[in-house]
Image (cartoon, coloured by chain):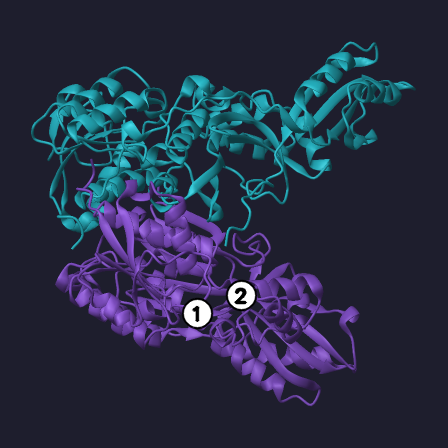
Chain colours: A cyan, B purple
Amino acid sequence: MGGEQKSLRVGIAGLGTVGGGLLNLLADQPEAGDGRLKVTAVSARDRTRKREADISAYAWFDDPCELAASPDIDVFVELIGGSDGPAKRAVEIALGRGTHVVTANKALLAVHGAALAALSEKTAAALLYEAAVGGGMPIVKALKESLAGTHVVAVSGILNGTCNFLLTEMEASGRSFEDVLADAQRRGFAEADPTTDVSGTDAAHKICILGAIAFSAAPDFAKATIEGVDTVTLLDIRMAGKLGYKIKLLAKAERVGESVRVHVHPALLPVAHPLAQIGGALNAAMVDAEPVGRLTFIGRGAGAGPTAAAVAADLIDLVYDAHRPVFGRPVKALKQRGSVGAAEQGRYYVRLLVHDRPGVIAAVSNELGRAGVSIESFLQDPGEAGADVPIVLTTRPGPRQALNAAVDAIAGLEVTAAAPRVIPIEDGAGAPRNWS
Amino acid sequence: MGGEQKSLRVGIAGLGTVGGGLLNLLADQPEAGDGRLKVTAVSARDRTRKREADISAYAWFDDPCELAASPDIDVFVELIGGSDGPAKRAVEIALGRGTHVVTANKALLAVHGAALAALSEKTAAALLYEAAVGGGMPIVKALKESLAGTHVVAVSGILNGTCNFLLTEMEASGRSFEDVLADAQRRGFAEADPTTDVSGTDAAHKICILGAIAFSAAPDFAKATIEGVDTVTLLDIRMAGKLGYKIKLLAKAERVGESVRVHVHPALLPVAHPLAQIGGALNAAMVDAEPVGRLTFIGRGAGAGPTAAAVAADLIDLVYDAHRPVFGRPVKALKQRGSVGAAEQGRYYVRLLVHDRPGVIAAVSNELGRAGVSIESFLQDPGEAGADVPIVLTTRPGPRQALNAAVDAIAGLEVTAAAPRVIPIEDGAGAPRNWS
């Protein structure tokens, strides 16, 4: 029953941890897809490299593009990575000739998703990518299929395990970002070149993709606002903690009228926020949609196992011929949505570093008052006192512009010892009204 | 692209809050399923009842079985409820003639799922039921599709919002079960006859279904072990809290060798357990699977909006002809799995009520020691002292049988004022090893 079942010949390009995990999983679970999945060919950089999986039974291709062009595969699994180069060329070749593609490549989808969706539609070849976002957490399918009858208001998440691990470790160990990163690199939890992760780029790729599905619009990576975790200090994590907040790298796509805002930035979340408790390398995604309310997904966002399982799920969808348009709607039905920049309104955390002398609080308060910024809480913690004293405050909801004016003025005060730090507060309110 | 799209004529039986919500949603979201869903006929008890939705445009059937038999619908949506009676007859009629069925009826699936799956397969009519478990939380699809390539070890969850609401309210307000239930009934949060909810039956229906998908076995409701929340006292909630636990109604299906254990019972969860923080009427499900690790889903488990959205998602699956076998695998591939009863091993919470006199602790400890029960923590809280004194203890992992012997002996002691209460502790450990 279901759509007619097909027997699929699978070619896998990229035999790193995920590719190896996939070979293991399909060998271990011969009944996956009711036995209608058969790996027939592979491609990787080095045929002779020692691997856990025995690849001698598969046809070998030195060039992934040749594998993608092979008439002897029905599905091309792309596990090469990168938004351009061989991954893109190979995927284009496969789709161009009507071969289905399953990929874990978020950069490719975020940057070239619109063109690839058009190509997929032209040749009726599926392009599936559950593994690109959230590892084994089935957030792509949930948005594309389970929430297809709803109005999504916002998708937010913790989508980069490395960043979350670093922030969690800083808080737990009281060590600096640089220390914790170096340690994570030694232990293999962070890449030798961690730029894509710590800069927020990886999380931005992922939230662009989720936003595209959620709002029926092609992904537009160039319009995302991105700030990473490399600017987060231990001092801010500690001071935020004293006020009842966690600092997390928040990735969020939200509707603003008919436009979309896609942003990645450090944010203060109240400890009771569903995403505040997500520790270590876990990922989480939260969807606010009418009339469903709020859905939260938590899982391991990376690693060979979860990613391979997500690729396998996509392959099994193909066995059942159960795929949808790339971003949930046909390309012609995707909406042209404008992008808006960082929020102009909100609550903010402001941390100052001032010389410890009388009259400082008055001077700071004066500037805030002059700019019309309303203060919610104010903390000068003697426990943190060194030569200079940190002062933190949170604002009531108000325009960012007014706050910027006040912060600029405070930065110019003679008592100010370092540039003030402003971090948005995400309250997690604004869940849709109870529609029922 | 995708499977060939069909235009589906939908007949809805049952126009209560969920049926009304579905009509609203489909009217509000004409693009759902890319416009290929059209409600054409409805059935309910009373045609003239005042409704929010205008039903004059739909063909009317007094009898849901006649609607199910109508050649003018492609999908029969069953929102009547109940494991037997008209719901069962109508679903059998629809499936029998090859008409797809979408239902929110957990009792029907849990009790008659095996026979219905066979019928569905015989006529190639889909039987979809995302709305039956967890409301808008897409746990059925996640297990059936996203985790199709994995080995599920256990599924556990908080699957009855009414029970969770009652427990949360008891803890927050310090009122008794009876008080809180009466209040919830007045406010419409609990049914006039709450038996199905508070007895654990509803949660058991749901976990039977999830276990069937997770372990590729027909659901076997008769074999489930069920205890409800009606036996939970405020005293136990308070004492558990002092030890760092929450009492939740846990529904769990787990593999035990080649058998399955399906049980619903009050359990102590450490506050850090993913399910411990689920408050109010929320639902949550946690899946442990190889090689994915642990996935957690949180959402509103009931209500017109979430349930209607889940029904709509199933309908859209049918538009894309994207359905799978009823429990994920063809009926002939479903495994015969034995059922095992309540766990014979574990950690337990034991609460005694004793007369306040010297030597009590020694007497109790003697009996525990004699039976070989190893104590982890022991608390006699003077704050709880009345005429009689509660003593609570938690055990180290050990056989339930030994504990029962000790508890029986303690119950017979002259100092014991009331029957001891034993509640299993669910540590939430046992997540699969990191497979990657």
Q: Position of residue A315 (x, y in %)?
A: 22, 40
Position of A168 relative to B280 (above/below): above
Amino acid bearing label 1: Asp
Q: Give whichever of A173, B237 is nearer the camera.
A: B237
Alpha-carbon neighbours of circle 1 within 10 Å: few (<14), some, or many (≥20)? many
Q: Give whichever of A323, A58 is nearer the camera.
A: A323
Position of A87 relative to B74 (above/below): above
Quadrant where the N terminus of chain B lies? top left
Q: Give whichever of B168, B31 is nearer the camera.
A: B31
- Left or right, residue A134 beside residue B427: left
- Where residue B336 sits, quadrant-wise, is bottom left
Write down the residue under mark 2.
Answer: B162
Position of A394 relative to A143 (above/below): above
- Identify the element where label 2 is drawn: helix
Q: Specify the subunit that label 2 lies on.
A: B
Asked if residue B231 can be seen in this view, the reply is yes
Q: Residue at x 29, y 43 (%)?
A: B33
Write down the residue under mark 1.
Answer: B202
Q: Position of residue A136 (x, y in %)?
A: 36, 41
Q: Position of residue A79 (x, y in %)?
A: 27, 28
- Left or right, residue B435 beside residue A407: left
Q: Position of residue A97 (x, y in %)?
A: 12, 24
Which of the labelled discs sits on residue A143, or is there none? none
